[in-house]
Image (spheres, helix red, strand yellow):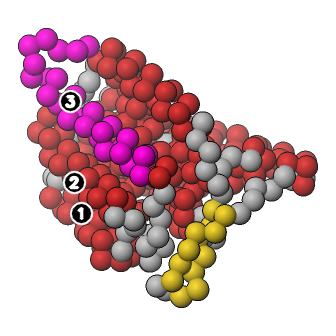
Amino acid sequence: MLENTGVQVAILVASIAGLASSSHFAIKSVEDIIEITGLRDVSAGFILLSVLTSAPEIIVAIIAITQGNSAVSIGDILGSNIFNIGVVLGLLGILGYLKLCCTDLLLELANMLSVTTLIPLFLFVNLFTIYQVPSQIMGLILLIAFVVNTYLISKKKTPTSRLICESEDKCEIEETKSIPDEKISRLKKITGFTTLLVSFAVVALSAQLTVYSATNIAIAFGIPAILVGAKLVAIGTSLPELTLDIAAVRRGRVQLAIGGIIGSNLTNLTLVLGLVLLGSPFQAETSIFIEILPFLLITTIVFWRFITKGGISKIEGAFLLLTYIAFQILVI
């Protein structure tokens, strides 16, 4: 029994590593596709990066549904959103990249995210109402919301920009031009799309092994599946956001990074959660679910507050990171 459990833990660690690394290569190719399509930074971050960085969560959700354990996916969705804000944006804030990051479109996206974060709270309340809304109907509503949001964001016209800093305290956003399509080599296009397809094949395999091993570990140790998803699987599915956004802000593409994070969280709570609810009844241990919710709400509200002020300072970034550390310590 113990030996078999050790094998499952090894499979989980290896599959999470494979999930993170393959997702990283997949998303790296997106930057080439952004140049090919000529999408603007924030729009590209929302439409392309948000969906692609949520691809691990999407595949985990599909596999979890087919294996009859949607709680792993629900935990993954909630945990990923907390990780994205607490760890990714927290670290970027600590490193000083987010002092000047707010635009009208980012503020609009942050407002949308704040409202959307109430969805898990509604799911919890719905469990105790007399006339419960069926999971399939809620799932369909969330999928429609995702399509509408994506359409509205795609219509936004915002300039591509880079953050230019003369010193630590003097930064400004500079507009840049997209690379014309005719200047992009045919080889670069083929390489980008090929890398994308191969990487996603590895993502799918890694996600299947992740759900399989996480489920077996939860059963062996009596750990709630939603907790395994939120605290372990979520780290693997969110590492691509961390590595890609650090790379993006180092090149001054702050708008792309933040647009990707906000879009990824919105995608998780609409597209991914919608697929889960459409494919199976809402399943989650209510005691653990209600412990996770406050951290999801706090990180989102605090992030929204920082964005409305114009950016995230180093101290504010440290606060976001400490919130995630508290989540890992206190939710057991």
Q: Residues within 10 Å of mark 2 (few under 14, many from 20)?
A: some
The tag earlier along the polypeptide, 1 or 3, is: 3
Q: CA distance from mark 2 to mark 1?
A: 8 Å
Question: Label 2 is placed on what type of residue?
Answer: Ile
The residue where tag 1 is placed is 323
Asked if marks 2 and 1 touch (Cβ < 8 Å), the reply is yes
The foreground one among 288 and 206 is 288
Give residue 122's position: percent from left, percent from top: 20, 30
Does residue 69 belong to the magenta stretch? no
Asked if marks 1 and 3 touch (Cβ < 8 Å), the reply is no
Give residue 91's position: percent from left, percent from top: 40, 70
Give residue 225's position: percent from left, percent from top: 26, 38
Question: Label 1 is placed on what type of residue?
Answer: Thr
Q: SS class of the residue under badge 1?
A: helix
Q: Within the image, what quadrant is residue 69 found in?
A: top left
Can you say whether 20 is above or below 171 in the image?
above
The tag earlier along the polypeptide, 2 or 3, is: 3
The residue where tag 3 is placed is 122
